[in-house]
Amino acid sequence: MRYFSVGIGGIIGSLFRYGLGVALFSEEAIFPTATLCANWIGCMVLGWLNTHTPRSSLIQDGIGTGLIGSFTTFSTFSVETLALFQHGHWISAWTYILTSLVGGLLLVHVGSRLARLQKEETEC
C-alpha cells in the first residue's frame, strides 16, 4: 500500500509541476520562476506535513515522498543554475541560489510553525 501511495502522489505531483511550468512559462524569461515557485511551495507544504503528520504514515509517504518529491526538483534547479552561469547571467544565478536556499529554509519553518499553531488551536 505504501508503494501505491507514493506512486499516486508522484503522478499527482508531476502533473502539478508540469501545470505550474506551463502557467509560468515565458519565452523572454531568464530567471527560472516556475522551478523556484515549485520548490518554495514544496518546502512550505513539507514543513507543515512533517510537523502535522506522523512520519511513518501513508499520508506522509504519499504526499511527502510522492507528491512533494515529484513536484519539487533539485536536479532542474541545478541544471538551470548551471545554464545561468554558462550564459553569463551571474547575478541571476546567484540570486536564484540564494533565494532558493534562504526562501526554502524560511518556508519550511513557516510551514512547520503553521502546523504547530493549528495543533495548539485544536487542543484548546
Image: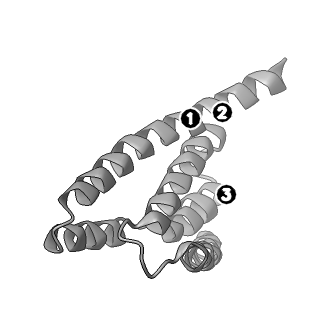
Image position, residue 60 (x, y; %): 60, 55
Name the spot of residue 88 as percent of width and height, x first.
15, 68
Quadrant in which the C terminus is drawn: top right
Q: Are marks 3 and 2 in contact (CB under 8 Å)?
A: no
Residue shown at 59%/39% (left/top)?
A: 111
Q: Secondary structure at mark 1?
A: helix
Q: What colour-coding does the image apply?
A: one colour
Image height of 57 relative to 86, above or below: above
Mark 2 lies on residue: 114
Determine contact: label 2, label 1, CB under 8 Å. Answer: yes
* Callout 3: SS: helix
Residue hosting label 1: 110
Name the secondary structure under disc 2.
helix
Q: Is residue 111 left or right of residue 94?
A: right
Q: Which residue is mark 3?
A: 59
Name the image quarter holding residue 23: bottom right
**Residue at point 45%, 82% (across, down):** 27
